[in-house]
Image (cartoon, grey):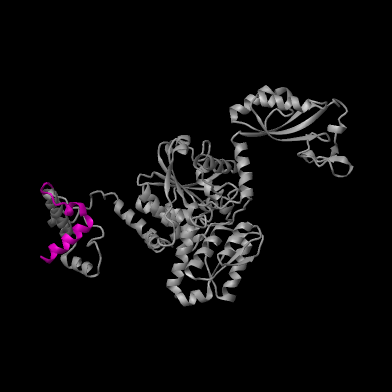
Amino acid sequence: TNFDSIMLRHLRASAPRAIGASSSGTSTGIKSYTFTFARSIRSSTNFAAIQAREAAGLRYPIANPRPFSSEVSDDNDDVTPDEDAPLPPPRRKTESLQRDIILESLPVTFADISRANVAIRAGVKRTPCIKSYFLSELLGANIFLKAEFQQFTGSFKERGARNAILTLLREMGEEKLRETGVIAASAGNHALALAYHGKDLGVPVTVVMPTVAPLAKVDKCRKFGAKIIIYGAHIGEAKEYAETLIASEGLEYINGYDDPPIIAGAGTIGIEIIEDVPCVDAVVVPVGGAGLIAGVSCAVKTLKPDVKVYGVEPEFAASYIAATNAGKPVPTKITPTLADGLAVPMVGPHAFEVARHYVDECVTCTEKEVSLAILRLIENEKMVVEGGGATGLAALLPGAKLDRPELKGKNIVVPLCGGNIDTTVLGRVLERGLAADDRMKNFVATVSDRPGGIARLTTLLGDHGASIKDMYHERKCTLFDKCSFNRPHGRCSFKKTFRRCKTGAFLHSNIDHVHVKVVVELQGKDHAQKNRKGTDRTWICPCLG
């Protein structure tokens, strides 16, 4: 019959394994499933409704079919329940339906992310998700690294930038958009991604960059053919200036973390995570303007709702946590941080509206943890990642906010979302990481001012296996690293007090001694303690560093 043909089509869609089985051993199960499914359809709706939905092209005939029960006959539908009987508890299906309605009304849905995943596939690299043996041993969990820094421009921003341009081309028409162009305010990764994909798609790009933008990124944007405007002391001022050009020059503004197509493009990372690591238990995502975590959490939670999604932002730029506490995006004071790509004073309203429905928790990480994370990635994985891209791993390090018992032994995916770090900054960050790891220390020692005094100190350090990285010989002031002795009248400003300097050349006792500041390279905390004990007689300060 016509009903049977409709039912079989939907059985193939909802239970392909059962219908597709051709062996004789599964025929009983197929018949049982077919009978149960048909009984459920007949008991929950009528044949005319099924035909109407089929004519409309809908895949499934019923949104929420009532489960069939052999204990209740169809004739009991008209029975009026006893008024004195207690009401049954509310069904979870009703709550789930209400939640689905809320999620479908958000600025970005999983359908948007799925469309973006198809649209950008030809122009964006699918990055690998690699398990790290060394980091897994260190953290006591199975750590998978999503290498988004391997994109052509060095960050995940390519996904959203390409999707945003393709969306505008579709909505405005190719001729109009290619005649006017797009504009954005960015200090780095978003500007690079937009300039590159704008050139690839034939769309003119204008980028307003603050004066603090790295010169290397500015030069790269110019090489991609983008029009560069340097304006403002920070990204906020650059954005305000960019908005003034929208009306005057007819440009389309693309927000780097809050436009829905940007969020949807970033969410394609979540789809790839579930495909590459189906057994994932948790995803730890860096948070700046919240566009990345909004898209990733939406995709991951839709495909696998039991996965935990954690956000991590630098403690000097905790704008998402401030928004969570206030219930809406609020301005936050920003302090310069190693994770400069995440230093956003206020999260995007669209991104926050999506993220707050999916993200389980957001924590902060310290500058020390960020520098250690960069060091661990370089040494163990040979991966060069910028500060913002390493914050997810930073929160998982021993002693950090996500170093928790419930995450031990779990499968954790960490997106490394960017690798655009200046070489000069990288050198300073590595030194900070070595110092945080107790592998580089500095101290002030008192040695004899006679010939051979410093030689005896270097011999002593060599006997204990310490490698001298730097040495500074100062006769004027012991506190030379905190002292402004060269100011008029020889005054010392140590501890914010002005007093006559009574050290070094002005010290009237121990005239045959001098102070030396030394920077040494060590092998770790135990080695540092061994050196301190062995050379304790020469320390000026009771502690290293």
* Res. 185 in view: no
Of 383 and 36, the residue lying toward us: 383
Q: Which image quarter: residue 56?
A: bottom left
Of 505 and 364, the residue lying toward us: 505
Position of residue 50 relative to residue 456, above or below, is: below
Residue 90 coordinates in the image, percent (x, y): 30, 51
Residue 64 coordinates in the image, percent (x, y): 25, 57
Residue 84 coordinates in the image, percent (x, y): 23, 50
Position of residue 66 relative to residue 194, above or below, is: above
Position of residue 224 relative to residue 505, above or below, is: below
Q: Which residues are magenta?
A: 1-25
Q: Main secondary structure of the magenta part?
A: helix
Of 35 and 134, the residue lying toward us: 134
| Horizontal side of residue 161 vs 519, given as left or right | left
| Horizontal side of residue 177 vs 496, given as left or right | left
In the rendered image, which quarter contains the C terminus?
top right
Magenta stretch containing residue 11, yes or no? yes
| Horizontal side of residue 72 vs 393, given as left or right | left
Residue under the point 62% across and 41% down: 432
Magenta stretch containing residue 252, yes or no? no
In the rendered image, which quarter contains the N terminus?
bottom left
Position of residue 302 relative to residue 194, above or below, is: above
Q: How many marks?
A: 0
* Res. 359 in view: yes
Q: Which image quarter: residue 295?
A: bottom left
Residue under the point 61% across and 49% down: 423
Residue 337 coordinates in the image, percent (x, y): 61, 49
